[in-house]
């Protein structure tokens, strides 16, 4: 009986931990990309540091970002003004939308380790608006953003995920 219970518990934990997070990116049309988004483009996961550039403004859409997970923007950016602004909304996703969420938005410089700056999103339930400016940036360097769900793990039967849209500009 104990072996059967242990096996069922292991299977249940394996199924609950196999949920993945992904971020869909929507960018202004460039010569490289068609103006119409396909379904595959809208669900592209940006789990790696970006290797291609795009012009600002840029819109990053986050979908089902699990607790402790982070996602990068698909592209890196150049600022001619020495600042990068972020605006938008983060919302509670998952099945526990009445529980508090925590997040941070990290700014990285291309080819440099460690975040250059971090904006900690105030604790929220339901949704929150973003409005922050990263200042004193070099106009000779490129930057990218990482959005992180810093909400603690709620247990095997609670999904404390994040979603939303972050508009990035100068």
Image (tube, helix red, strand yellow):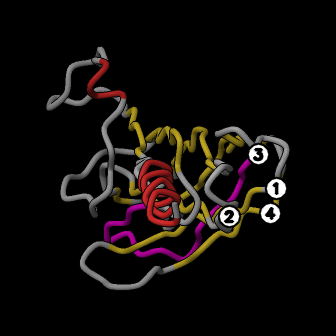
Dot 2: within a 10 Å radius of its alpha carbon, few (fewer than 14), some, or many (20 or more) residues? Answer: many
Q: Nearer the viewer, residue 163 or 72?
A: 163
Q: Nearer the viewer, mark 2 or mark 4?
A: 2
Residue that carries the numbered disc 3 in the rendered image: 129
Residue at x 59%, y 68% (from the top left corner):
134
Does 96 sit above or below residue 10?
above
Q: Nearer the viewer, mark 1 or mark 4?
A: 1
Q: Nearer the viewer, residue 102 or 160?
A: 160
Residue that carries the numbered disc 2 in the rendered image: 151
In the image, taking residue 89 as reference, residue 58 lies left or right, namely: left
Which SS does the magenta portion mostly show? Answer: strand
In the image, taking residue 145 as reference, residue 85 lies left or right, namely: right
In the image, taking residue 79 as reference, residue 160 lies left or right, namely: right
The residues bearing labels 3 and 2 have C-alpha atoms spaced at a distance of 17 Å
N-terminal-most mark, 3 or 2: 3
In the image, taking residue 166 as reference, residue 22 lies left or right, namely: left
Q: Secondary structure at mark 3?
A: strand
Tell me whether circle 1 and circle 2 mark residues in contact (CB < 8 Å).
Answer: yes
Tell me whether circle 3 and circle 2 mark residues in contact (CB < 8 Å).
Answer: no
Q: Nearer the viewer, mark 3 or mark 4?
A: 4
Residue that carries the numbered disc 1 in the rendered image: 100
Examine the structure image and report whether residue 141 is included in the region drawn in magenta: yes
The residues bearing labels 3 and 4 have C-alpha atoms spaced at a distance of 10 Å
Range shown magenta: 128-146
Examine the structure image and report whether residue 72 is included in the region drawn in magenta: no
Does 147 sit above or below residue 21?
below
- Image x and y of residue 166, in percent: 57, 44
């Amino acid at each position: 009986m104990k072996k059967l219970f242990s096996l069922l518990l292991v299977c249940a934990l394996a199924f609950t931990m196999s949920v993945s997070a992904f971020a869909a990116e929507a960018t202004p049309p460039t010569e490289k990309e068609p103006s119409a988004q396909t379904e595959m483009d809208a669900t592209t996961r940006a789990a790696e540091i970006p290797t291609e550039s795009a012009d600002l403004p840029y819109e990053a859409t986050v979908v089902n970002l699990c607790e402790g997970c982070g996602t990068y923007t698909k592209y890196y950016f150049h600022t001619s003004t020495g600042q990068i602004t972020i605006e938008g909304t983060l919302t509670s996703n998952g099945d526990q939308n009445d529980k508090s969420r925590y997040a941070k938005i990290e700014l990285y410089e291309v080819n440099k380790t460690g975040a250059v700056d971090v904006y900690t999103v105030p604790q929220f339930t339901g949704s929150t608006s973003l409005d922050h400016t990263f200042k004193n940036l070099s106009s000779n360097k490129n930057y990218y953003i990482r959005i992180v769900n810093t909400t603690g793990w709620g247990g095997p039967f609670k999904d404390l995920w994040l979603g939303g849209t972050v508009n990035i500009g100068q």
